[in-house]
Amino acid sequence: MNAIQIKNVTKRYGGVTALDNVSFSFSHGKIYGFLGRNGAGKSTLINLIANRIFADQGEILIDGLPARENMDVHEKIFCMSEMDLYDTSLKIRDHFKWINRFYDSFDLEKAFRIAEQFHLDTGKKFKALSKGYQSIFKLTVALALKVPYVIFDEPVLGLDANHRELFYDLLLSDYESGERTIIIATHLIEEVANLIEEVVLIDQGKVLLQESVDDLLEQGYCVSGLASEVDSYCQGKNVIGCDELGGLKLAYILGEKTLPPQDSRLQLTAMNLQKLFVKLTEKGGN
């Protein structure tokens, strides 16, 4: 099976359970949004997939191969993360050359081409770069690797608006030129909402949902109006959260949309992905 399969994975840190018997898959050929609040278990799972830490129970398979300490998956997956795992005293162009020796799938010419687009000075040492340009270097490495699975963990950290737009454009162009799986873990949900095809939402060490973005947004909507009318409309519906101000109320609902009575003053509006994420996770999910 061409996928990253997470099977009954549990990871504990002392008395804290970061992941609790988690099972799901990242299928090949999709762009995923991997979403979760701070401390939800998102980074732990990414580090498990990247072989930086190991699960207490369960296993992770990449295209059917066990991921744990297995060099056969080396050319299958790459994780760009917030952590600085590079020699800070080495120049960027020398990093590119060493990565080219370590990965058969690294496109050295493409790396220098992307660096030029971002105006990344490859003659500078890693430690001499600003936080934003350190992120750009990591993005460049990930985009220049022709591996089937790429994970971007908070990819636009420190990037200005122009650089973020350039990254998203390059990412889409790269995806369209050769099918692979791209997993984006980010808190800037609305920025990636038009890029991602499927959402995996994790909270308190468990997967709350895994659905296509289109299906998810079709299910979610808001109803607003006088609190009494909103409460009456919401009877029997899956309300995932509410906001109130004075006598007015706004309810967030998952499920099939039903129109209010003709004489009703209620308003029905679409719910965006960011708001859906907030309401599903603010009280530990529904």
Image: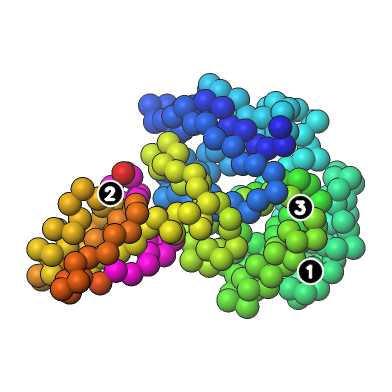
Q: Is the C terminus in the top left, top right, bottom left or bottom right quadrant?
A: top left
Where is residue 35 shown, x and y percent of the image?
48, 51
| CB contact under 8 Å: marks 3 and 2 | no
Answer whether residue 211 is magenta in the image: no
Task: Return the x and y of residue 5 as percentages of the image width and height.
Answer: 62, 33
Name above or below for residue 21 compared with residue 107.
above
Which residue is under mark 2? 238
Residue at 63% x, 73% y is 165
Q: Which residue is mark 3?
A: 179
Q: Is residue 108 left or right of residue 156?
A: right
Residue 71 visible in the picture: yes
Residue drawn at x 61%, y 41% is 26
Cα separation, mark 1 vs mark 3, equals 23 Å
Neighbourhood count class around disc 2 (C-alpha, 10 Å): few under 14, some 14–19, many 20 upward:
some
Is tag 2's residue or tag 1's residue first in the polypeptide sequence? 1
Residue span colored magenta: 268-285
Q: CA distance from mark 2 to mark 1?
A: 48 Å
* Dot 3 or dot 2, earlier in sequence: 3
The answer to whether residue 278 is visible is: no
Category of crowding for the residue at label 3, using alpha-carbon neighbours closer than 10 angstroms: few (below 14), some (14–19), many (at least 20): some
Q: Residue furthest front?
A: 262
